[in-house]
Amino acid sequence: MLNNNQYKLVNVTKDDYDLLFIWANDYEVRANSFNTDEIKYDEHVKWFESKLKQDTSSMYILEIQNKKIGLVRLDKILAHKYLINYSIAREYRGQGYGTILLKLIKEKYNSNLLIGKVKKDNIASIRAFKNAGYYMRQDSEIYTFYSKNFEL
């Protein structure tokens, strides 16, 4: 369990529109996404407003010492089962923050099954999920990670 009070997940608000737009259009984020197309601002605003209203989607920003480090979004698939999407701001990559974020969200949603899907060449995310204690199953082009061990 992470006991360090400097790490926290805070709810995304409308004030985060622009920051999340910048993060979403980062070259590496687009390259590692399943949809690699650049995101247009008006589409982002429409999508963002829709996500904020949905009760099947939750978004959090990882903050460390009041610095915004990354985003995690959970989309409900079924009761107690969520798909994870996350990214770390460019200037904080390679410092272990992906692992911290994935551990924190796993603790926050500990009675649920969290599922992450990662392209096979996204080494940083594969490492972050493994280091955060997720269980891995490899398909041909995609690695799937689970927050709980069950019969895969």
Image: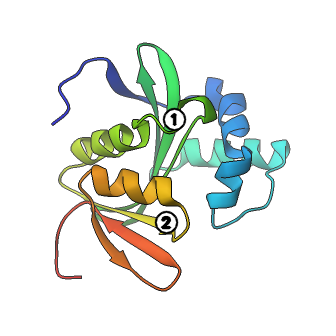
Identity of the residue drawn at 17% across and 81% down = 151
Identity of the residue drawn at 39% across and 38% down = 96
Amino acid type for the residue under numbered disc 2: Val
Identity of the residue drawn at 49% across and 39% down = 94
Residue 149 x %, y % = 17, 69
Task: Note whether residue 136 is visible.
Answer: yes
Callout 1: helix, strand or loop? strand
Q: From the image, tell me which residue sits under label 1.
A: 70
The reply to whether discs 2 and 1 touch (Cβ–Cβ < 8 Å) is no
Q: How is the image coloured?
A: rainbow
Q: From the image, tell me which residue sits under label 2.
A: 118
Total label count? 2
Q: Quadrant of the N terminus?
A: top left
Q: CA distance from mark 2 to mark 1?
A: 17 Å
Q: Residue furthest top?
A: 65
Identity of the residue drawn at 35% across and 43% down = 99
Callout 2: helix, strand or loop? strand
Q: Quadrant of the C terminus?
A: bottom left
Q: Is residue 73 left or right of residue 1?
A: right
